[in-house]
Amino acid sequence: MPGIETDQFLDVVVSVRKAYPMMGSFDYLFDDDCPRKFELLQRLTRGDRVMVRGGQYVANHVVYRETGAAAFVLPAQTYEPGIENVLVEANVPWAHANTNWSIVDEEIRACREPEQLVGIIKPRRGAAKMDLAMLIEAHLWAAADATSKVLPLTVPYYVKPIHGDQVKDDGTYDSNCGVAGGFQGGVPTGYSDVAGIDPGAYVQGTGWDDNTYRRWRNYNWQWSNSSGLYTDTDEDRMGFAFDYMGFESPPMVNEIDTPAFQDTRMYTNRVTKQSMERRAKQQNDQVGFDLAHYQNHTLFRGLPLIWQNRLDTYDAARGYYPTYMLRWNFGGMAVRQGHVFVERTFGGDKYLPDVTTTHLDITYQMWCHNRQLFGAVGSYVAST
């Protein structure tokens, strides 16, 4: 009898898969026909931002200080040269994600010929890969969970808000710490380090206990009120963060997606965004304000404010009503060599004898090679 025999079903699915190979990368997120926008994942995986690594964990070396050998000298002066260690290893564990799609024997029998299966398999397979991207994207705003052996690292892991102790001391024991802002983001709750590097712990009434890796602290500031409303004080503090982080404003608004500015973005919650929008409309025709309203977009110093619904929900890892300022070119994604969108197809078993299932797996982790320049966050955190 012509057509596909029952014992050929597994081979047929595998053959169709091989005839239409899946790209082993996130390039599909940048296709013109991509059904949705992946604001974080697209920036995290752009260009050479994806590192391919092997081994038991993701390792990357970062510069944590200068040599200290630079000096003004006299002619014919003698020197005492030496080798200074300026590198420290940052390392994070791998995370694994899986999705799958299946086809029932009856669907294969109805199609009869392998070519007819393409119309079923391609969209089902594509939807599974898109589902995997949605899982990763949604988790990137999640709180850092030190108890989990499964969940990957996130933006709040690397970009920590101000601590209640720092709010209370407000620069008394460290002039670089306080509510106005500074590079004072330490270790997330429950962890002993950040990617294997300990930036020190802030102790109330004393200050930092260790400044060896002080460059491994992110910038943060205290939002002026617990309601998330935008005030002149918040405008000043956002401006400080903008300057200290080395952000630059595009000369023209329509240049925000050019290579020089496409990786610099600001993310906020709905309450704060609406408050800023109202302020921008009120002052739109006035000169000299940091906030502006342009073609239905609210801009801070020429950069767009992007609403992220995950930031509407309170979490201690982010504080109340957070606003993030991120430079994606100082972060990225590491993927494990040989385990990027790996497909494996299995035939039916005694529980589902008429179902052929294909699993899609990826091993990856979010990474950051410069915490100071990667991101800043402003949110309200109560004093301890």
Image (cartoon, helix red, strand yellow):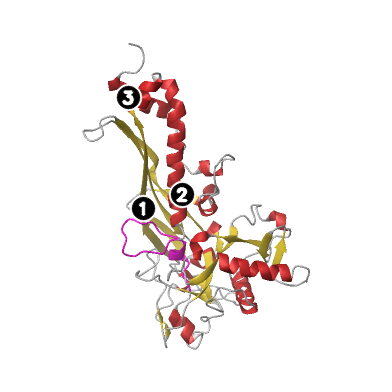
Quarter of the image for the C terminus: give it. Answer: bottom left
Residue 370 can be seen, yes or no: no
Q: Is residue 367 above or below residue 287?
A: above
Residue at image location 54% in from the left, 43% down from the top: 35
- Residue 323 shown left or right of residue 301 in the figure: left
Return the residue at label 3.
Answer: 9
Between marks 2 and 1 in the image, the one whose residue lies nearer the viewer? 2
- Residue 141 shown left or right of residue 302 in the figure: left
- Percent position of residue 28, x then y: 52, 41
Q: Which of the 4 image quadrants contains residue 86?
A: bottom left
Q: Which mark is residue 95?
A: 1
Cα–Cα span, label 2 and label 3: 30 Å
Residue at image location 56% in from the left, 64% down from the top: 270
- Element under disc 2: helix
Residue 2 can be seen, yes or no: yes
- Percent position of residue 330, x then y: 52, 59
